[in-house]
């Protein structure tokens, strides 16, 4: 392992490094060292085939035949996860523990005759497997009659107190940013809106967490700044430039979430959350769409390899277990990480350090394609720009040409930066810090040769109709017209991928063969589509039709419906 340190650190027996700007707390340092941990999504949605429950789902639905939290913990551990964050309560309001503050919980379900506690079983399983445990508690509750009123905040904190005092040590508390909208709300069946920054009175909630779980970090997407931030997307990547700094107060637009803020005044690193499947909850239709090994490695490089952590979701199937497709892929993911980073090629190389330049000299021409560098973030994040060059046949070749981020240099390092590039045979590798906020403190430089992985080849396995024409009859109405009548089985919508404007959150779908007699096929909500802009499938009983009318009943933003792609599945 090669190391490059500033002169102050080289003489650290005489001088102690001076922090540069905001620095992490011990809790944040401990969290960052975890690098990868699992999300577990399991709730009523598992049994309704939804992503967001409405809040009126019958309690009788929850009766898994083979729930095994130890299987979850074993799979996550084998997949390289250091802990598990569990959805103790999602937006539907159903509690996965026997909360004494609501009847809408496992205590009133057929499972274990109401004597079960999923949170307890998972917390115990994590301890047995040496994993850390954490909880997700949705601030939004589509079941509770008082949501939107002051009384609900008391209820919310009472439930949080249960989770923080009855299940042992918690390493993270996770609050979703989805707040307010349609809901059952005790039978009111209405839309309720709240101000996520003020309604929950986060400052008081944070004080309670600090008191009850002093070693926990807080993830929060609204109101007061927590210890960690969302990276602005659920696609599994953070910006190539990624500062662990944020403004202490104020709004956080996408560019701040995704890239951090170089001169931010608080340490608030990014946590990259994504699912091993397209959705967060289990859906049978996604059994063959588990992310490939190539995609998972790409996610790893663009999260852990960009100064973030990776929060990877494993949904639980209706039987109460992680599906074999997910577990096998997760385990293969860990094995591939181990294989790639098994042999550090600098171990048998000569390391020469001069000021802000490190030269790694190999004994003979050596093939490599990965470079790892780490700052000692205990003293702040310092490096603004650096370069990589390889000596080939006596000439220095800038690798920046393949990896341009900001002019002629690569940006930000932080806890860990992994640079991927095409395999090159070289006798030397030169790493140079070009710009930094303070003298750089680099604690690691390493070089590896990763095997080539086959990139993803999309294959839906469906028959997609190609003889169709798409046009708009109004800003919120799309017509899909076929050359001839078709037997249609489903309709698929991909939201815009480069902007949230025009994203359809609520829809209606109609069919006709003569332009006058229209039949409504489906209507509803694309749950979580704004944060997770993936393909949405609308299913219905097969119908013969020549025309489809797709209507945007509600848009996230803008006045005109937008789309990335449209597919119609036919027999």
Image: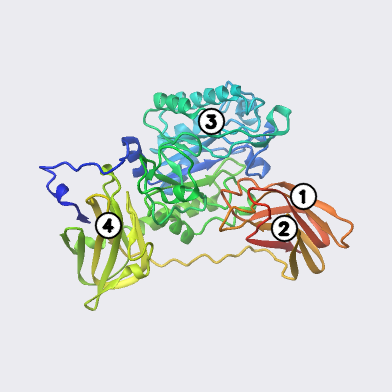
Picture residue at 29% right of the left edge, 60% below the top = 386
Is 20 positioned to the left or the right of 300 in the image? left
Question: Spatial distance from mark 2 to mark 1, Cα to Cα?
Answer: 10 Å
Mark 4 Cα-neighbour bin, 10 Å: few <14, some 14–19, many ≥20: some
Q: Secondary structure at mark 3?
A: loop
Disc 4 target residue: 435
Q: Nearer the viewer, mark 4 or mark 2?
A: 4
- Mark drawn on residue 123: none
- Tell whether label 1 touches label 2 (CB within 8 Å): yes
- Mark closer to the chain start, 3 or 4: 3
- Mark closer to the chain start, 4 or 1: 4
Check the image and report above or below for 369 versus 227.
below
Percent position of residue 418, x then y = 35, 57
Q: Nearer the viewer, residue 327 or 274?
A: 274
- Mark closer to the chain start, 4 or 2: 4
Q: Secondary structure at mark 4?
A: strand
Disc 2 target residue: 491
Percent position of residue 347, x then y = 21, 60
Question: Spatial distance from mark 4 to mark 2, Cα to Cα?
Answer: 51 Å
- Mark closer to the chain start, 2 or 1: 2
Disc 1 target residue: 522
Disc 3 target residue: 198
Check the image and report above or below for 495 versus 49.
below
């Amino acid at each position: 392992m090669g190391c490059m340190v500033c002169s102050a650190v080289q003489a650290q027996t005489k001088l102690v490094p001076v922090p540069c700007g905001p620095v992490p707390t011990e809790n944040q340092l401990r969290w960052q060292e975890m690098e990868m941990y699992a999300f577990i999504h399991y709730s009523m949605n598992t049994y309704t085939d939804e992503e967001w429950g409405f809040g009126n789902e019958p309690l009788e639905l929850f009766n898994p035949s083979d729930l095994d939290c130890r299987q979850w913990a074993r799979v996550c551990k084998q997949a390289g996860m250091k802990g598990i964050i569990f959805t103790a309560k999602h937006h539907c309001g159903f509690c996965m523990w026997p909360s004494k503050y609501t009847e809408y919980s496992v205590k009133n379900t057929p499972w274990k005759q109401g004597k079960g506690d999923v949170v307890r079983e998972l917390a115990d399983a994590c301890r047995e497997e040496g994993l850390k445990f954490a909880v997700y508690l949705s601030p939004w509750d589509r079941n509770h009659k008082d949501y939107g009123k002051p009384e609900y905040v008391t209820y919310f904190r009472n439930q949080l107190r249960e989770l923080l005092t009855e299940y042992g040590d918690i390493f993270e508390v996770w609050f979703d940013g989805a707040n307010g909208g349609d809901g059952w709300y005790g039978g009111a069946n209405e839309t309720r809106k709240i101000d996520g920054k003020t309604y929950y009175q986060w400052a008081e909630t944070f004080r309670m967490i600090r008191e009850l779980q002093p070693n926990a970090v807080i993830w929060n997407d609204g109101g007061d700044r927590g210890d960690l931030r969302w990276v602005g997307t659920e696609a599994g990547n953070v910006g190539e430039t990624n500062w662990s700094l944020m403004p202490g107060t104020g709004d956080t637009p996408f560019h701040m979430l995704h890239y951090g803020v170089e001169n931010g005044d608080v340490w608030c690193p990014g946590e990259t959350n994504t699912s091993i499947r397209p959705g967060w909850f289990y859906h049978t239709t996604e059994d063959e769409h588990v992310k490939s090994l190539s995609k998972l490695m790409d996610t790893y490089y663009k999260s852990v390899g960009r100064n973030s952590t990776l929060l990877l979701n494993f949904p639980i199937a209706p039987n109460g277990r992680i599906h074999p497709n997910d577990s096998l892929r997760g385990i293969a993911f860990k094995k591939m990480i181990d294989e790639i980073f098994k042999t550090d090629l600098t171990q048998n190389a000569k390391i020469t350090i001069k000021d802000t330049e490190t030269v790694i000299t190999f004994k003979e021409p050596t093939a490599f394609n990965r470079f790892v560098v780490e700052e000692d973030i205990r003293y702040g994040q310092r490096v603004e720009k650096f370069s990589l060059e390889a000596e080939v046949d006596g000439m220095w070749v800038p690798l920046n040409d393949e990896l341009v981020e900001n002019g002629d240099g690569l940006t930000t390092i932080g806890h860990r930066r992994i640079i991927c590039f095409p395999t090159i045979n070289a006798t030397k590798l030169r790493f140079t810090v070009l710009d930094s906020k303070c003298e750089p403190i680099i604690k690691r430089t390493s070089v590896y040769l990763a095997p080539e992985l086959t990139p993803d080849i999309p294959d839906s396995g469906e028959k997609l109709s190609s003889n169709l024409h798409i046009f708009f009859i109004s800003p919120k109405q799309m017509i899909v017209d076929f050359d001839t009548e078709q037997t249609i089985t489903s309709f698929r919508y991909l939201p815009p991928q480069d902007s949230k404007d025009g994203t359809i959150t609520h829809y209606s779908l109609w069919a006709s063969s003569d332009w006058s007699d229209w039949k409504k096929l489906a209507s509803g909500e694309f749950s979580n589509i704004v944060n997770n802009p993936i393909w949405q499938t609308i299913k219905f009983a097969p119908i013969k039709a020549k025309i489809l009318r797709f209507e945007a009943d509600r848009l996230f933003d803008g006045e005109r419906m937008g789309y990335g792609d449209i597919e119609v599945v036919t027999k």
